[in-house]
């Protein structure tokens, strides 16, 4: 082959290789960025054990909680993402901590149960964003704190388990339904195991996965609530019994269970995590968190990237990436390990993290914003 032809062949080969490389770069998606955690505007009150609910208009309703032990709030406040500021709104009829909150289809927020001093309560209230006021609704069928409240496809609310009193045996196996049409509570089927500080995750088929919890001992078994039958049925056991953990629905329909503690609480915090697969009804281990943590928000936040954000119980935030099964540490950190804080995904995709307390009972009013 003469030199001009040889040179031409090399040029063509080079152009082809460059084109293939460029095409490869275009077809392989880049890894989503980790985002960043930064301080936000403080709340009007220092709170832990409160609830945070995203309203239909994009604001966040912060309700109740405590400043310190036995110093519970009736007050509530609203966070406006547009201004980044909080303002007061109406008060509840009673101060409470460890309650549950759920947004109804009407745009109102149902608040149920909690501790009101040295005992739990069966009281419930509705917050109306249009008037900024709370109104009492019918009492629950049982006094309960550390229960879960989940919006069903029907628009009614399933309330499960909880703690009725301190000490062993204080957990509840009962459940009840809040009917939005009548604003009344009705007893429903019982769990197979009493439990509190468990998680409740709504699956893609409308069933509710109840996992973990405590009732004088950790509960390993998980249960499924089927709205069609109104019954609970046992499903697979957790690989590691835990409570005060977090759970989150992944884009493919599986559920992440992460962190928590054993019966030793502060001395038994966990970094382990596992995945529930509805197709098999079984749990399988996945990679561990980078730090052990407990007293977490009940629901891990699903980001637009498909990753789950896990916060609380540590200075650092972590992202669970279902494509790799690994937890990634988010740049930026909080000034302390805040427990019983809240994390709320905003309409713009950012996440508001608010309040909590460290290893004593004095809460903080600090907030942080996670920017993906």
Image: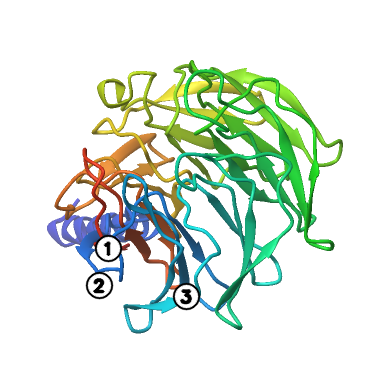
- Would residue 30 appear left or right of 113 to someone viewing this image? left
Q: Position of residue 281 (x, y in %)?
A: 65, 24
Residue linked to disc 2: 41
How many neighbours does mark 2 have within 10 angstroms: few (below 14), some (14-19), or many (20 or more)? some
Q: Considering the numbered disc 2 on the image, is that residue within a helix, a strand or a loop?
A: loop
Residue 28 at least partly seen = no
Instruction: Give the residue at x 56% y 19%.
Output: 169
Q: Mark 1–mark 2 contact, CB under 8 Å?
A: yes
State the mark number for residue 121.
none
Residue linked to disc 3: 59
Q: CA distance from mark 1 to mark 3?
A: 15 Å
**Along the viewing direction, whichever of 245 and 113 lies nearer the viewer:** 113
**Along the viewing direction, whichever of 171 and 299 lies nearer the viewer:** 171
Q: Position of residue 70 (x, y in %)?
A: 36, 46
Q: Position of residue 180 (x, y in %)?
A: 78, 61
Instruction: Give the residue at x 35% y 27%.
Output: 287
Q: CA distance from mark 3 to mark 2?
A: 14 Å
Q: CA distance from mark 1 to mark 2?
A: 6 Å
State the mark number for residue 367.
1
Tell me if residue 27 comes above or below residue 280 in the rendering: below
Please name the colour scheme applied to the rendered image. rainbow
Tell me if residue 110 comes above or below residue 76 in the rendering: above
Q: Considering the numbered disc 3 on the image, is that residue within a helix, a strand or a loop?
A: loop
Q: Mark 1–mark 3 contact, CB under 8 Å?
A: no
Instruction: Give the residue at x 28% y 57%.
Output: 33
Mark before the other along the chain sequence, 1 or 3: 3
Task: Tell me the quadrant of the picture where the C terminus can be found.
Answer: bottom left
The image quadrant of residue 24 is: bottom left
Q: Considering the numbered disc 1 on the image, is that residue within a helix, a strand or a loop?
A: strand
The image quadrant of residue 6 is: bottom left
């Amino acid at each position: 082959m003469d030199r001009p032809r040889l040179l031409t062949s090399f040029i063509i080969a080079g152009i082809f290789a460059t084109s293939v490389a460029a095409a490869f770069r275009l077809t392989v998606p880049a890894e989503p960025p980790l985002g960043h955690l930064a301080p936000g505007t403080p709340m009007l009150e220092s709170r832990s054990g409160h609830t945070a609910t995203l309203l239909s208009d994009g604001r966040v309703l912060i309700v109740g909680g405590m400043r310190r032990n036995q110093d519970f709030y009736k007050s509530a406040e609203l966070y406006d993402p547009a201004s980044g500021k909080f303002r007061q709104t109406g008060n509840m009829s009673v101060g409470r901590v460890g309650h549950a909150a759920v947004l109804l289809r009407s745009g109102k927020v149902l608040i149920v149960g909690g501790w009101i001093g040295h005992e739990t309560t069966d009281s419930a209230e509705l917050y109306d964003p249009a008037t900024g006021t709370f109104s009492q609704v019918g009492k629950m069928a049982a006094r309960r704190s550390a229960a879960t409240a989940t919006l069903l496809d029907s628009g009614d609310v399933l309330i499960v388990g909880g703690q009725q009193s301190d000490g062993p045996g204080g957990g509840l196996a009962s459940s009840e339904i809040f009917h939005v049409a009548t604003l009344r509570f009705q007893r429903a089927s019982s769990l197979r195991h009493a439990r509190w500080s468990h998680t409740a995750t709504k699956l893609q088929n409308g069933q509710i996965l109840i996992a973990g919890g405590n009732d004088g001992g950790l509960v390993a078994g998980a249960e499924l609530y089927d709205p069609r039958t109104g019954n609970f049925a046992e499903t697979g056991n957790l690989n590691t019994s835990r409570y005060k953990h977090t759970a989150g629905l992944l884009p493919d329909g599986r559920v992440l269970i992460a962190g928590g503690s054993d019966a030793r609480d502060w001395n038994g915090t966990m970094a382990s995590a596992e995945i529930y697969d509805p197709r098999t009804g079984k749990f399988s281990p996945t990679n561990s968190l980078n730090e052990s943590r407990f007293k977490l928000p009940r629901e891990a936040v699903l980001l637009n990237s498909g990753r789950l954000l896990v916060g609380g119980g540590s200075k650092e935030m972590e992202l669970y990436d279902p494509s790799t099964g690994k937890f990634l540490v988010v740049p930026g950190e909080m000034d302390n390990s805040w427990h019983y804080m809240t994390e709320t995904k905003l309409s713009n995709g950012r996440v508001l993290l608010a309040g909590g307390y460290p290893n004593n009972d004095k809460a903080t009013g600090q907030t942080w914003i996670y920017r993906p």
